[in-house]
C-alpha cells in the first residue's frame, strides 16, 4: 500500500486547523447532514470492518445490537477503548499522539450511529502525552461545535469525556473497563447481559477499539466498497496498523493492508532480523496472549482468518519477533508472570491458576522440576481456559498451551538439566 | 413457562429463573460458593459450571437464565472435571487448617472436597501467605488465608446494609478481603457476614473456639430482642454426651444465627439480637422460690402465698400486675385468666423502647410480643400508671413479671413506692433490682428455656421454642399462673404444655383463632392473612 490512511498525519501538525485543512471533520458533517444513524450502521456493516482490539467482531453488527428506539430515561453510551495494555501493542498510542482529532472525530461519528448521549475515551493511564494531545483536541472540538449541544446544527447532543485508567491490564477488557469507568474495581462482568442491553451504569453501551473507530471517517468519506476492497477479502479488509517489536532491525508501527504477509513485514519493512546470524525462531503475532507461531508457520498473511488457520490470532496485531537466541522457557515464564500479575483475582481458575503456572515454570527454568510437571502445567492451563468470566483466563492459557506444543523439547531440556538448549 | 431438561428430567419453571435455582428447586445439588439467594449474582467462584447442550463452553448455572428447550447436564464427566478443577484451584493456597477452624463441620470447602474433588492435591509449591485473625470489627475476625474471594461479605455490606466497609484489596492471587483504611466492620448487622461466609474466613469473636459445631444441638426459634421477631436457630452445647468422663453438663446457648423467613427477616438478623443470649446468660438468676428476707420456700408454699396475697387484694380492688412486653402470649393468657377469676386486678404493660426503627430489621420497640400482649390482655394501663397508683397507696399486692431476656428491661420501682405496697410478688428469671425488693420471688424460665408464641409488629404469630433446660427452678410463666390458680380456687384448664395453652388461647382470643403449634410451624402465620383465609 502506498497511500497511508490511518497514519497520514503521523509526524505532522496535530492542530485542529491542520486537521480540517486535510478534510477533517468533513465526514462528521456529511453524516450529520445527510445520513440517518441506521444508514451509518448499514454502511459500516457493508464495509466489513472488524474490531481491531483483539476479537475481530464485525463492528456494524455490534452497533446494531443497540436499541433502535431510544428510551429517554436510558441514555446511550459509547466507549472508545484506548486502554492499550496488551504487551507488544502500541498502535492506538500513535494515533492519539499524532492525530488526536481523528480519534475525536471518529468517536463522535461512531457515537452518532448509536445516538449516544456521552462518549468516553478510556485511555491507558501511562499514556501521558496521548492524554495531553487528546485533552487539547477535545477542547478545540468543543469550541468548534463538533461536540456538545446540537452538534453542527443536527439537533444531536453528545458529550465527549476523556477518562484515564490507573494502570491495570484488565481494564482493557470491555466489561472491566465499564466497572472501572463507574469508579469500581476493574472487574469483568459475566455476559449476558451484553453491554448493548446493560453496560455502563446499566445503560445501553457499545465499546470499540480506538483503531476500529478511526476507520469510520474514511469509510464515510470513500465508501464501504472502497474499504472492503482493501486487504485480503471481504472479511479481512481495510487498512491495518501492525506493531512490530522484538528481534528486528526496525521495530515500530506500520500501516499496511489487512492481510499483509508476516515475512514481508519482518524482512521488508522491519529491516530483517536484528542479528543476521540469528534466524527467526518464533513469533507471537497478536499481542502476548495469542498462541505462538513457530518459524515454519510464519509464512502467513496477517489477517483474522489466515492466522486463525495457523492456530493463532491477529489479536491486537502486536507482532513480537523472537530469534534463535530466545529461551522459550524464559519467554513463557515472562509471559505467565505478566498474567499472574495482571489477573484481577475475581474468579477462581485465573486467580489461582496463573500463579500456579508461574511457580511451576520458575521451577522448570531453575532445573527444579520433574517431567510430570509439564503435564501438570498443561493441565492447569486447560482448566483455566474456558472457565473464567473474561478472556484473560484464556489469554493466560493459550501461550502455555502453544509454547508446550511447539517447544516442548526446550522445557524437557531444562528439566533434564541439559547444558545446551536444543533449539 | 419454559420447559427444560435437567439431567434427563424435564421440568417447567418460571421465566427468568436461573439454571441454579431451577436445579435446586428439583432437589439437584449444584455446588456453589458465591451465589447467595439474598445477594446479587457475582459469578466468580465458578463452582456451579454446568453443561448446556449447544453452548460452546460450560456456563455458570447461577447467572444463566433458563430457556425453552435447554438441555442441561449438572453431573456429566465434563462438569465433574470442571468441578474437580475448581476445587483444586481453591485448595492450592488454602491453609487446610480445619483442625483449628471454627467452620469445620459446616464448611463448604470441606463438603465439596468430599463430594466434588479428586481427593488429592498436585500442588507442591509454597502457598500464598496472608494475615490470620485480623480484627476487622467489634464482632468479626478475618482469616485472609482461608478466604476464597467469593465476595458474599462485600456484597452484603454493599447491598444489604449499604455500609460498604469491606472490599477486595490487591490483585490476582494476592487478592484479599479487608476493611477500608480507618474503617471497621461495625454496622449493626456485621455478624451476618460470618453466617454467609462459606468457609472459615470470617468468624464471630463470641463463638470463636467455643465449640465444635458437631457438639451443638440446634433448635429453630424466634429472637425476642425486638418486635421484628427474626427467625433464628439457637445452638446449645451438648457436650455432656461427648464428655462423660468429666460429667460436665453444659447446655448453654453457644450461638444464635438467623433462619430464613422471607416474610420476616429474609436471611439476616442484627448483632444485638444475635448476641441477646449473652444478656440472658449473664443475668443473675433466682435459684428457687423465696419468701421475705431471702427465706427459701418450697414451690407449693410460695404459690400458696402468692395466691392468698393476690386474692385478698383483688377482693378489695387493690391488686395490680405489671408485665414486660416480651413474654409469650401463653403467659399473658394464663395470668389474664387467673386475674379474671380473682376479680379486679389492674394490669400495666411495661414497654421497652430503645433507639429507632431502621430500614432493614431493627425495631425501636424491643418488646417482642407487645402485639400479643395487647391482643390477649385487651385494655391495659401503662406500667407507670400502675406504679403511680401504687405510689399513692392504692395497691396492696403488686405482681411484677420481670423480663425473660434481659434483666435491664424489667421495670424499676422506687423505694417510696415499694414502701407503700404491702406485697411485692416478683415472677421472672432474673434476680434484678426489682426482684431484690420483692417480698416473694417465683423463678420463671427465661426466653430460651420455655416455648410460646410471639407476635411481631406486623401481627405475625410465631412459635418460640425451648432450646435447653432452665438454668434454675424457673418454670414457664403460664405454668406459674396455673399453679397460683390452683391455690386461689380459680379454675383453669389442666395445661401440660405451652402448646395446650395456645389451644385455649386459640378458642378465646380472636386473632389467634384456629392457631396451634403445628400450624404455626417453623415460619409462623400472619394473623391478618390467617383471618382472611379462615373467614
Image: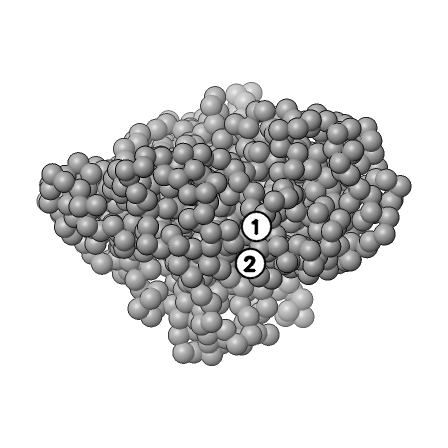
Tag 1 residue: A257
Kindly state the secondary structure of the residue where label 2 is placed.
strand
Identify the chain of the residue marked 2, using the numbered disc in the image: A
Q: Quadrant of residue B100?
A: top left
Q: Chain of mark 1?
A: A
Quick one: label 2 or label 1, which is nearer the N terminus? Answer: 2
Name the residue rendered at 28%, 39% in the picture.
A278
Residue at image point 28% right, 38% down? A277
In this rendering, position of residue A176 left or right of residue B205: right
**Are both tags, 2 and 1, on one chain?**
yes
Foreground of the two, B104 or A13: A13
Q: Which mark is residue A399?
A: none
Q: Nearer the viewer, residue B167 or A120?
A: A120
Spatial CA distance of label 2 from label 1 is 8 Å
Q: Do the numbered discs 2 and 1 sit on residues whose CB atoms are within 8 Å? A: yes
Viewer-closest of B131 and A59:
A59
Image quadrant where one finds the C terminus of chain A: top left
Residue furthest right as drawn: A153
Identify the residue shown where x is 60% and y is 62%: A234
Give the SS element for disc 1: strand
Q: Residues within 10 Å of mark 2 (few under 14, many from 20)?
A: some
| Residue A225 visible here | yes
Residue of label 2: A232
Give the x, y percent position of residue B283: 38, 32
x and y percent of residue B194 in the render? 40, 41
The number of callouts visible is 2
Q: Residue at x 73, y 60 (%)?
A: A42
**Percent x, y of residue B488:** 48, 50
Amino acid at each position: 500500500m502506498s497511500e497511508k490512511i490511518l497514519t497520514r498525519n503521523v509526524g505532522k501538525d496535530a492542530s485542529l486547523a491542520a486537521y480540517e485543512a486535510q478534510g477533517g471533520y468533513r465526514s462528521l458533517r456529511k453524516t450529520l447532514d445527510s445520513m440517518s444513524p441506521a444508514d451509518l450502521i448499514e454502511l459500516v456493516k457493508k464495509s466489513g470492518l472488524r474490531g481491531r482490539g483483539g476479537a475481530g467482531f464485525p463492528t456494524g453488527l455490534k452497533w446494531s445490537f443497540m436499541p433502535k428506539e431510544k428510551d429517554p430515561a436510558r441514555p446511550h453510551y459509547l466507549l472508545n477503548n484506548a486502554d492499550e495494555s496488551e504487551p507488544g501493542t502500541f498502535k492506538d498510542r500513535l494515533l492519539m499522539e499524532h492525530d488526536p482529532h481523528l480519534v475525536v472525530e471518529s468517536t463522535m461519528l461512531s457515537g452518532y450511529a448509536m445516538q449516544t448521549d456521552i462518549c468516553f475515551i478510556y485511555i491507558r493511564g501511562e499514556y501521558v502525552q496521548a492524554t495531553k494531545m487528546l485533552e487539547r483536541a477535545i477542547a478545540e472540538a468543543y469550541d468548534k461545535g463538533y461536540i456538545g449541544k446540537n452538534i453542527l446544527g443536527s439537533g444531536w447532543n453528545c458529550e465527549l469525556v476523556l477518562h484515564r485508567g490507573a494502570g491495570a491490564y484488565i481494564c482493557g477488557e470491555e466489561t472491566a473497563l465499564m466497572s472501572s469507568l463507574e469508579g469500581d474495581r476493574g472487574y469483568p462482568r459475566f455476559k449476558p447481559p451484553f453491554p448493548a442491553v446493560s453496560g455502563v451504569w446499566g445503560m445501553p453501551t457499545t465499546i470499540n477499539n480506538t483503531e476500529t473507530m478511526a476507520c469510520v471517517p474514511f469509510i464515510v468519506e470513500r465508501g464501504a466498497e472502497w474499504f472492503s476492497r482493501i486487504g485480503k477479502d471481504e472479511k479481512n479488509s481495510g487498512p491495518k496498523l501492525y506493531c512490530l517489536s522484538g528481534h528486528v532491525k526496525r521495530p515500530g508501527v506500520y500501516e499496511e493492508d489487512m492481510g499483509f504477509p508476516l515475512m514481508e513485514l519482518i524482512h521488508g519493512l522491519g529491516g530483517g532480523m536484528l542479528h543476521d546470524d540469528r534466524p527467526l525462531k518464533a513469533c507471537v503475532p497478536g499481542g502476548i496472549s495469542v498462541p505462538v507461531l513457530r518459524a515454519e508457520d510464519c509464512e502467513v498473511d496477517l489477517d483474522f482468518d489466515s492466522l486463525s488457520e495457523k492456530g493463532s490470532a491477529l489479536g491486537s496485531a502486536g507482532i513480537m519477533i523472537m530469534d534463535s537466541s530466545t529461551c522459550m522457557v524464559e519467554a513463557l515464564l515472562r509471559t505467565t508472570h505478566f498474567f499472574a500479575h495482571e489477573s484481577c483475582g475475581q474468579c477462581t481458575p485465573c486467580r489461582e491458576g496463573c500463579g500456579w503456572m508461574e511457580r511451576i515454570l520458575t521451577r522448570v527454568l531453575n532445573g527444579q522440576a520433574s517431567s510430570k510437571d509439564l503435564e501438570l502445567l498443561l493441565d492447569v492451563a486447560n482448566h483455566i481456559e474456558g472457565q473464567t468470566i473474561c478472556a484473560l483466563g484464556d489469554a493466560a492459557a493459550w501461550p502455555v498451551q502453544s509454547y508446550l506444543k511447539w517447544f516442548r523439547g526446550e522445557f524437557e531440556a531444562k528439566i533434564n538439566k541439559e547444558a545446551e538448549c536444543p533449539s | 413457562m419454559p420447559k427444560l431438561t435437567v439431567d434427563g428430567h424435564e421440568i417447567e419453571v418460571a421465566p427468568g429463573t436461573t439454571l441454579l435455582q431451577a436445579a435446586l428447586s428439583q432437589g439437584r445439588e449444584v455446588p456453589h460458593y458465591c451465589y447467595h439467594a439474598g445477594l446479587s449474582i457475582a459469578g466468580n467462584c465458578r463452582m456451579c459450571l454446568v453443561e448446556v447442550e449447544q453452548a460452546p463452553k460450560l456456563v455458570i448455572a447461577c447467572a444463566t437464565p433458563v430457556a425453552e428447550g435447554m438441555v442441561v447436564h449438572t453431573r456429566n464427566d465434563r462438569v465433574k472435571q470442571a468441578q474437580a478443577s475448581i476445587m483444586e484451584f481453591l485448595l492450592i493456597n488454602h491453609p487446610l487448617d480445619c483442625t483449628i477452624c471454627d467452620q469445620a463441620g459446616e464448611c463448604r470447602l470441606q463438603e465439596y472436597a468430599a463430594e466434588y474433588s479428586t481427593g488429592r492435591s498436585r500442588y507442591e509449591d509454597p502457598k500464598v501467605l496472608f494475615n490470620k485473625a485480623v480484627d476487622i470489627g467489634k464482632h468479626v475476625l478475618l482469616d485472609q488465608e482461608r478466604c476464597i474471594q467469593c465476595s458474599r461479605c462485600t456484597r452484603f455490606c454493599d447491598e444489604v446494609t449499604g455500609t460498604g466497609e469491606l472490599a477486595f484489596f490487591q490483585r490476582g492471587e494476592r487478592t484479599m478481603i479487608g476493611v477500608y483504611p480507618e474503617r471497621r466492620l461495625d454496622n449493626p448487622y456485621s455478624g451476618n457476614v460470618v453466617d454467609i461466609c462459606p468457609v472459615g474466613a470470617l468468624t464471630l469473636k463470641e463463638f470463636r473456639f467455643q465449640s465444635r459445631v458437631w457438639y451443638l444441638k440446634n433448635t429453630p426459634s424466634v429472637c425476642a430482642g425486638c418486635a421484628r421477631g427474626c427467625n433464628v436457630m439457637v445452638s446449645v452445647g451438648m457436650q455432656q454426651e461427648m464428655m462423660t468422663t468429666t460429667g460436665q453438663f453444659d447446655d448453654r446457648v453457644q450461638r444464635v444465627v438467623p433462619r430464613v423467613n422471607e416474610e420476616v427477616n429474609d436471611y439476616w438478623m442484627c448483632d444485638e439480637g444475635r448476641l441477646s443470649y449473652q444478656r440472658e446468660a449473664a443475668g443473675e438468676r433466682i435459684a428457687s422460690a423465696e419468701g421475705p428476707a431471702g427465706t427459701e420456700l418450697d414451690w407449693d408454699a410460695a404459690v400458696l402465698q402468692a395466691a392468698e396475697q393476690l386474692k385478698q387484694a383483688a377482693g378489695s380492688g387493690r391488686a395490680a400486675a405489671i408485665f414486660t412486653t416480651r413474654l409469650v402470649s401463653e403467659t399473658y393468657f394464663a395470668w389474664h385468666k387467673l386475674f379474671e377469676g380473682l376479680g379486679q386486678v389492674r394490669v400495666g404493660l411495661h414497654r421497652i423502647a430503645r433507639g429507632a426503627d431502621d430500614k432493614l430489621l431493627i425495631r425501636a420497640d424491643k418488646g417482642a410480643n407487645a402485639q400479643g400482649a395487647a391482643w390477649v390482655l385487651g385494655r391495659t394501663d401503662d406500667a407507670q400508671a400502675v406504679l403511680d397508683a401504687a405510689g399513692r397507696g392504692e395497691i396492696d399486692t403488686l405482681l411484677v413479671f420481670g423480663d425473660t431476656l434481659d434483666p435491664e428491661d424489667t421495670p424499676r420501682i422506687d423505694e417510696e413506692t415499694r414502701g407503700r405496697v404491702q406485697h411485692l410478688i416478683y415472677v421472672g428469671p432474673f434476680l434484678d433490682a426489682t426482684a431484690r425488693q420483692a417480698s416473694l420471688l417465683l423463678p420463671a424460665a427465661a426466653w430460651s428455656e420455655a416455648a410460646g408464641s410471639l407476635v411481631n409488629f406486623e401481627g405475625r404469630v410465631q412459635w418460640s421454642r425451648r432450646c435447653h433446660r432452665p438454668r434454675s427452678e424457673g418454670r414457664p410463666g403460664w405454668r406459674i399462673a396455673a399453679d397460683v390458680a390452683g391455690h386461689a380456687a380459680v379454675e383453669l384448664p389442666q395445661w401440660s404444655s405451652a402448646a395446650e395453652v395456645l389451644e385455649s388461647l386459640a378458642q378465646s382470643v380472636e386473632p389467634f383463632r384456629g392457631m396451634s403449634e403445628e400450624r404455626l410451624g417453623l415460619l409462623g402465620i400472619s394473623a391478618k392473612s390467617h383471618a382472611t383465609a379462615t373467614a
